């Protein structure tokens, strides 16, 4: 068996479980895998995207996967290249995304011997969290096939660690090994929920299906911006304001997905003797140890009409520039467009003011980290027909400046809106702010920064615009990308 044959058979197997996109970072040990992916591309069976560093590449792959709803694969060389995938793989695990990491390795005999770029790669992402296969040869392909099927069926990431010996590559014939693999569908049991109560529906990340349930039940819907359910007649846009004084009125709570944005929602859940948690790709949700888990839910009965009406009250108005960015982008976004919201303050502003509208809104809410946000938005833009507008904070942007290196990518449909308030304003909500001196809080938590985003954008080949008013925001909404729009409150 040659290295190239092993790579050909493996890449063909990955393609056969409906992986169309292969994201690649350059390296030596992975060359046979790259040639196999290129062979599929030349035969019209795959697409390839090259990104120079693995961390940016992995979040780009993640964005592509969440926007398309399809599994994607990543190809990297050995050593620290593999470790750089870890943040995106963890996000994929907690968000239920089938992200396939194909990691090249040296032969088993060289592990622990001081061989260059060699570490213990199999299970590097912790096999208790993310499954893996250590491929030594063709005999391991049958196990690999089953693990791939499980990954797609269960919406989970997977590591395929492949050991290659010299010679590392040859002419590829990967397309001859393609096969047809059926992915068994899961059987889902629907539970009927008695809705003859004053109840509410909470929709967090992965909360698709919440709108239909809320409308059938006649209940108010508290939907986070990236829930997939923040539209329809039952959406209460300012629910966090109203919840402060109305928790005791609520008799029943049904949760779809993973709500993590709002402390008032957490307090409501903690106050209930029991909630009903509907399964999602984000995994079980039971933060107060009071959840009854169901696979799917349908409403039986409904609340009286005045219950929903009592929640439909106008929100308080705050003329901040952040709110203007959110509301104007929501107004301009159509069915073929996408919005990406970075973690931290901006998604919480959107949770307060984003209108009820059926549009595609994405955010990394599996672990709710700020890293990789620019790269994730790039991956989303690759799978969006219309415009992708990503809205993030300045510290979030700094975490992924390397992701702005577009290499071979052409992204006229990507706008990056960065709200620059020179530090982490979200941390002003922390209790520690009241406990320490202002200079201590600024240094360790707010972390003021003085990055010149205009120079960085120009160096990376992006357009640049500065927005300091509502008129500026309006002007920037239709600018062709890739463009970096710095918003200064």
Image: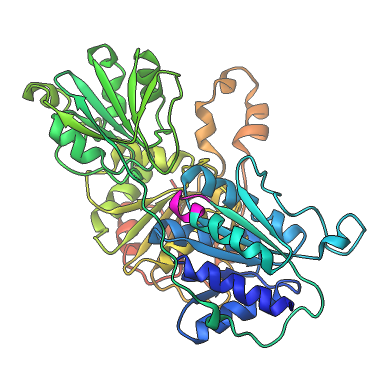
Look at the image and say whether residue 71 sits in the magenta stretch: no
Quadrant showing the C terminus: top left
Say above or below: 292 vs 223: above
In the image, 171: left or right of 232? right
Of 150 and 203, nearer the camera is 150
Residue farthest to the left, as pictured: 305
Question: Which range is magenta?
Answer: 150-156
In the image, 107: left or right of 322? right
Say above or below: 52 vs 467: below
Asked which colour scheme the image uses, the reply is: rainbow
Residue farthest to the right, as pictured: 113
Q: Residue at x 45, y 19 (%)?
A: 289
The x and y percentages for residue 58 are: 58, 59
Q: Quadrant of residue 480?
A: bottom left
Determine if residue 482 is in view. yes
Q: Residue at x 67, y 33 (%)?
A: 444
């Amino acid at each position: 068996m040659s290295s190239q044959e092993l790579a050909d058979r493996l890449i063909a197997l990955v393609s056969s479980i409906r992986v169309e996109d292969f994201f690649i970072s350059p390296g030596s040990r992975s060359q046979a895998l790259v040639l196999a992916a290129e062979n599929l591309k030349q035969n019209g069976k795959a697409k390839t995207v090259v990104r120079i560093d693995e961390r940016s590449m992995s979040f780009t792959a993640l964005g592509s996967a969440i926007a398309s709803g399809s599994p994607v694969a990543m190809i990297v060389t050995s050593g620290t290249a593999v470790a750089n995938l870890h943040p995106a793989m963890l996000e994929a695990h907690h968000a239920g995304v089938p992200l396939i990491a194909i990691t090249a390795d040296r032969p088993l005999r060289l592990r622990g011997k001081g061989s260059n770029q060699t570490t213990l790669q199999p299970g590097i992402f912790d096999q208790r969290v993310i499954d893996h296969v250590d491929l030594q040869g063709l005999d391991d392909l049958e196990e690999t096939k089953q693990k791939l099927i499980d990954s797609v069926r269960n919406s989970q990431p997977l590591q395929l660690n492949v050991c290659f010996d010299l010679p590392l590559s040859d002419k590829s014939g990967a397309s001859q090994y393609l096969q047809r693999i059926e992915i068994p569908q899961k059987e889902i049991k629907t539970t009927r929920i008695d809705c003859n109560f004053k109840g509410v529906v909470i929709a967090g990340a992965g909360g698709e299906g919440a709108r239909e349930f809320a409308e059938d039940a006649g209940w108010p819907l508290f939907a986070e911006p990236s829930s997939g359910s923040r539209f329809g007649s039952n959406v209460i846009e300012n629910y966090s304001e109203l919840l402060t004084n109305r928790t005791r009125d609520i008799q029943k709570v049904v949760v779809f997905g993973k709500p993590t944005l709002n402390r008032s929602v957490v307090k409501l859940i903690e106050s209930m003797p029991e909630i009903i948690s509907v399964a999602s790709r984000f995994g079980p949700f039971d933060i107060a140890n009071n959840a009854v888990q169901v696979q799917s839910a349908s409403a039986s009965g409904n609340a009286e009409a005045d219950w929903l009406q009592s929640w439909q009250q106008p929100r308080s108005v705050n003329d901040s520039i952040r709110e203007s960015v959110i509301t104007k982008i929501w107004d301009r976004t159509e069915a073929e467009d996408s919005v990406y919201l970075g973690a931290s303050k901006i998604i919480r502003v959107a949770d307060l003011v984003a209108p009820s509208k059926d549009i595609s809104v994405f955010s990394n809410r599996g672990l709710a980290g700020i890293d990789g946000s620019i790269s994730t938005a790039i991956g989303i833009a690759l799978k969006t027909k219309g415009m992708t507008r990503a809205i993030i904070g300045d510290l979030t942007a700094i975490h992924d400046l390397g992701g702005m290196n577009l290499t071979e990518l052409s992204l006229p449909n990507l706008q990056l809106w960065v709200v620059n308030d020179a530090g982490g304003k979200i941390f002003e909500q922390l209790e520690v702010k009241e406990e320490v001196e202002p200079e201590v809080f600024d240094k360790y938590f707010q972390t003021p920064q003085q990055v010149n985003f205009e120079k960085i954008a120009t160096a990376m080949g992006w357009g640049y615009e500065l927005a300091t008013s509502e008129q500026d925001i309006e002007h920037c909404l239709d600018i062709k990308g890739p463009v970096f729009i710095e918003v200064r409150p």
